[in-house]
Image (cartoon, rainbow, N blue to C red):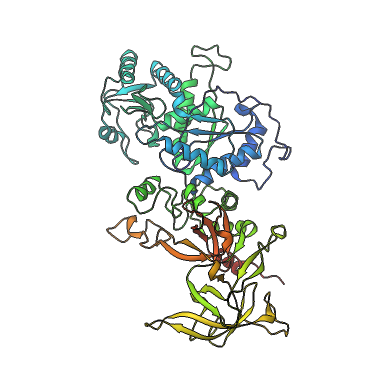
């Protein structure tokens, strides 16, 4: 599992009994088609060696808990499980671990389904819910009681913790550990019936209170919770713990490889113990006293995603929303998939990112610049180019005919010849960026300044001749002259200019709101707070700047979600708040690529 992945349910039995034919895109020995990481190596060996996986098709699952929105860390977990199933021609399930009704909501279920599909992890009809398995897991719990492997415990939560011991000291047995089978069965049935208050009793596995693995010290299997379930209503008053439920749910669905994040490595012995305990007394042919053995998946762990300037705790992301720091789970500053989607990220870029970071067993922190680099690479190929001015400054071409409008050809995407061209209106009055004019230019400044000639993108050469200022001395209007012979941006006499700037025709400009985002946290590690303070001290106060901009008229009715490169400014996405003739754009990412720059520094020199 990952982060907060948990098991879920399905309405089917284990039907995973396909032949063991390697996928068409894999080598004959069953290895995956791409670079083979340790997980794919392990899966290939399992298929090659047979054993309990003989005759089974590779079957994985993604088991999110519906208590929040998915974030970029889940994209890695999802990609690992889906990618392994895809590479081996197997099956992939989306299964909700809805075993904790106190924190789960239908809103989260709907959002997760949308995110999984958006990311391209197709699960077809294999959508399951852990709560649908409650009756079966309850029956198996009764079986363990009858086998003397589980008991009802009256210790309260803090007492259970005290009895458990520490990493260096063994625990001690509960005074209720030796209850008779008959008493345990009676109490467990009454727990289910709702006779007892929350926390009054638990069902615990009887393993070893002196085990060096603290997870094996009689872990809790069921707790009492008088809370309505979003799918089961009030049918249950006890709910299974994750460690008890998820291996059994994997078994029911025929999962072959349960891929999860590294924090579950110490839980793997418990995963195996529960299935082995159920299979104790069972036989392959079902002739034993307890029937046929249940399927035993293999759990494999990998390092989860950690990324600079990014909070991965679902609990803290919920706090950001509820405290009003952000506007919702889909706020473009959030690392949720909904937030990234609204900001303008593409599923292709996220999948490429998760592919490049790879799969390993060691925790590490990935620079967010790599994610942005993957996004730029993708948007550079697919995003249409447009002109927009974020901080407008009026420019007047004094010798251009008043009232005249020209339609100039502009390239839609130089990376895609099939994208063709569009026309943009040009007139005597334009808007340019404030930073593209400097009255007293500093050394190395080659854009517009008094006496300086520059190129207007797709238009003409212009030269600054004068300026207008307000009473505070700020430049409000720049006056220029143009050379009519340079239409299209080239000079017949061959003279060159050192700068090309973008513009928007003032009479045709469409007012727009542009939301410019900065990282939500001021430090690469959001938890690196000053002494005596917590992670909240690192929240950036001004992570959102709303700009009153002007855009070219072709953007007036752009649909929500459409992505553009504003020339020289960055990549932007149309926000759902947009209205016709009042568009709203989110800045997805700037054009500057620090990751690519760093890669060039470290690349070997070619001789």
Q: Position of residue 95 (x, y in %)?
A: 50, 33
Q: Where 490 falls versus 136 (above or below)?
A: below
Is 194 left, or right, of 248 in this rendering? left
Is 96 left, or right, of 459 in this rendering? left
Is 477 left, or right, of 415 in this rendering? left
Q: Number of callouts in the render?
A: 0
Q: Quadrant of the C terminus?
A: bottom right
- Which residue shows up at 44% across the image and 28% down it? 245
Q: Position of residue 230 (x, y in %)?
A: 39, 30
Q: Is residue 442 visible?
A: no
Q: Where 268 falls versus 546 (above or below)?
A: above
Is 549 left, or right, of 315 in this rendering? right
Q: Quadrant of residue 502?
A: bottom right
Q: Where 464 falls versus 208 (above or below)?
A: below
Please name whichever residue, 163 or 357, is drawn nearer the observer in this view of the structure: 357
The residue lying furthest to the front in this view is 403
Q: Is residue 364 visible?
A: yes
- Which residue shows up at 31% across the image and 55% down it? 534
Q: Where 218 falls versus 84 (above or below)?
A: above
Q: Position of residue 454 (x, y in %)?
A: 60, 80
- Which residue shows up at 47% across the image and 50% down it? 339
Q: Position of residue 416 (x, y in %)?
A: 69, 59
Please name whichever residue, 471 or 133, is drawn nearer the observer in this view of the structure: 471
């Amino acid at each position: 599992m990952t982060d907060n992945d948990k098991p879920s349910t399905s309405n089917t039995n284990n039907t995973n009994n396909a032949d063991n034919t390697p996928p068409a895109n894999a080598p004959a020995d069953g290895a995956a088609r791409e670079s083979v990481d340790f997980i794919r190596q392990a899966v290939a060996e399992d298929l090659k060696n047979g054993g309990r996986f003989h005759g089974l098709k590779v079957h994985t699952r993604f088991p999110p808990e519906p208590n929040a929105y998915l974030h970029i860390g889940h994209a890695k977990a999802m990609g690992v499980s889906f990618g392994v199933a895809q590479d081996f021609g197997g099956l992939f399930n989306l299964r909700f671990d809805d075993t904790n009704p106190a924190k789960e909501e239908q809103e989260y279920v709907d959002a997760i389904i949308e995110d999984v599909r958006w990311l391209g992890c197709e699960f077809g009809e294999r959508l399951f819910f852990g709560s649908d398995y409650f009756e079966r897991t309850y029956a198996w719990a009764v079986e363990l009681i009858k086998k003397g492997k589980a008991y009802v415990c009256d210790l309260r939560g803090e007492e259970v913790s005290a009895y458990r011991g520490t990493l260096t000291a063994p625990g001690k047995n509960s005074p209720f550990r030796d209850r008779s089978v008959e008493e345990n069965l009676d109490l467990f049935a009454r727990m289910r019936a709702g006779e007892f208050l929350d926390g009054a009793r638990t069902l615990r596995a009887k393993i070893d209170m002196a085990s060096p693995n603290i997870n094996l010290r009689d872990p809790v299997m069921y707790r009492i919770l008088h809370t309505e379930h979003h799918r089961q209503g009030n049918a249950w008053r006890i709910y299974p713990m994750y460690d008890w439920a998820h291996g059994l749910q994997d078994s029911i669905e025929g999962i072959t490889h349960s891929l999860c994040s590294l924090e579950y490595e110490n839980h793997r012995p418990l995963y195996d113990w529960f299935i082995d305990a159920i299979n104790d007394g069972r036989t392959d042919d079902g002739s034993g006293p307890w029937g046929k053995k249940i399927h035993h998946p293999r759990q494999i762990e990998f390092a989860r995603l950690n990324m600079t300037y990014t909070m991965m705790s679902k609990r803290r992301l919920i706090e950001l929303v509820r405290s009003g720091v952000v506007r919702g789970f889909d706020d473009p500053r959030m690392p949720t998939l909904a937030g990234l989607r609204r900001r303008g990220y593409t599923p292709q870029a996220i999948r490429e990112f998760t592919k490049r970071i790879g799969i390993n067993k060691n925790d590490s922190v990935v620079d967010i610049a790599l994610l942005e680099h993957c996004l730029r690479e993708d948007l550079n190929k697919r995003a249409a180019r447009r002109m927009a001015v974020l901080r407008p400054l009026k420019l007047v071409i004094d010798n251009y005919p008043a009232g005249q409008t020209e339609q100039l050809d502009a390239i839609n995407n130089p990376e895609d010849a099939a994208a063709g061209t569009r026309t943009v209106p040009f007139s005597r009055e334009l808007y340019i960026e404030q930073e593209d004019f400097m009255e007293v230019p500093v050394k190395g400044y080659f854009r517009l300044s008094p006496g300086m000639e520059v190129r207007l993108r797709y238009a003409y050469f212009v030269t600054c001749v004068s300026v207008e200022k307000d009473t505070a001395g700020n430049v409000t209007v720049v006056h220029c002259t143009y050379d009519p012979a340079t239409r299209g941006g080239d000079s017949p006499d061959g003279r060159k200019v050192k700068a090309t700037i973008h513009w928007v025709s003032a009479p045709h400009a469409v007012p727009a709101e542009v939301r410019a985002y900065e990282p939500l946290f001021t430090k690469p590690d959001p938890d690196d707070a000053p002494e005596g303070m917590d992670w909240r001290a690192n929240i950036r106060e001004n992570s959102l700047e709303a700009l009153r901009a002007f855009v070219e008229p072709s953007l007036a009715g752009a649909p929500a979600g459409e992505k553009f490169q504003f020339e020289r400014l960055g990549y932007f996405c149309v926000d759902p708040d947009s209205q016709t003739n009042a568009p709203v754009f989110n800045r997805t990412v700037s054009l500057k690529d620090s990751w690519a720059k760093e890669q060039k520094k470290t690349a070997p020199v070619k001789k």
